[in-house]
Amino acid sequence: MSESSASIYDLLEDDDEQQQPRAARRSGGVRAWLRSALAAGALAAAVVLGLRMVGVEVSPAAIFAGFLALLLIRRVAQALIPPPPPRIRLVRDPERGEEDGSYNWAVRDALGSSVHRWEAKLAWAQGEPERFNRAVLPVLAELADELLRQRHGITRAGDPVRARALLGEPLWQFLGTPAKRTPPPRDLAAYVAQLEKL
């Protein structure tokens, strides 16, 4: 199966829109407005003719104004569509072979977003034990339970003796009791390292 380079924006545009460059569609030139007026006139004429054939009398000016308004609303909506995000292409150096494994922190992705969320939570709770106990400690406890469940088939509540042995006494005490003070970064790093060893 071959990979396609089409974005979701390319798939949602009609064929006429794909053929016109985006800059030309946004230009708002006199030609485009005249084309809209002519299209509204043609649509209005067709509708008025169709309604007169079945015996319904309507005002051609009202039908024309309605179609013109719809087409103008469509043009304004298209002009307000933000440009698609730039495509990020990974470039590999053929001489080096594989990538070096370093992470580009300037690119916004799920990993970067998660790291920034954790940084914000930790900064928000710094020096505030109540905030730390409310925002950070429950998430770390859930993470510990999830790691225990995935790797050992237990949880802290389901098998506390074995969970305590796997977590180690300092981490067990940290997760089980609310903090009286916000732990220093080196203690948090030690707890995270212990979680990673699970």
Image (cartoon, rainbow, N blue to C red):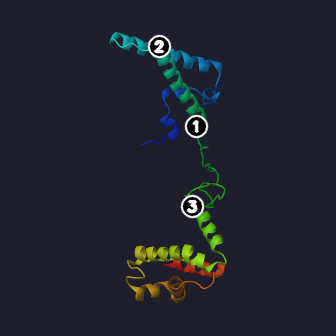
Residue 188 seen in render: yes
Q: Quadrant of residue 28?
A: top right
Q: Up-down: is 86 above or below 144?
A: above
Indicate the quadrant containing the N terminus: top left, top right, bottom left or bottom right: top left
Which is nearer the eye, 125 or 97? 125
Instruction: Give the mark nearer the N terminus: 1 vs 3.
Output: 1
Which is nearer the eye, 38 or 154? 38
Q: Residue at x 64, y 30 (%)?
A: 23
Q: Residues within 10 Å of mark 1 (few under 14, many from 20)?
A: few
Marks 1 and 3, how far apart in space? 28 Å
Q: Quadrant of residue 183?
A: bottom right
Q: Residue at x 63, y 26 (%)?
A: 24
Q: How many numbered discs, if any?
A: 3
Give the image location of residue 97, x and y in percent.
60, 54
- Amino acid type assigned to the residue bearing label 3 in the image: Leu
Residue beneath label 3, please?
A: 111
Instruction: Give the mark nearer the N terminus: 1 vs 2.
Output: 2
Contact (CB < 8 A) between labels 1 and 2? Answer: no
- Amino acid type assigned to the residue bearing label 2 in the image: Pro
Q: Which mark is residue 81?
A: 1
Marks 3 and 2, how far apart in space? 59 Å
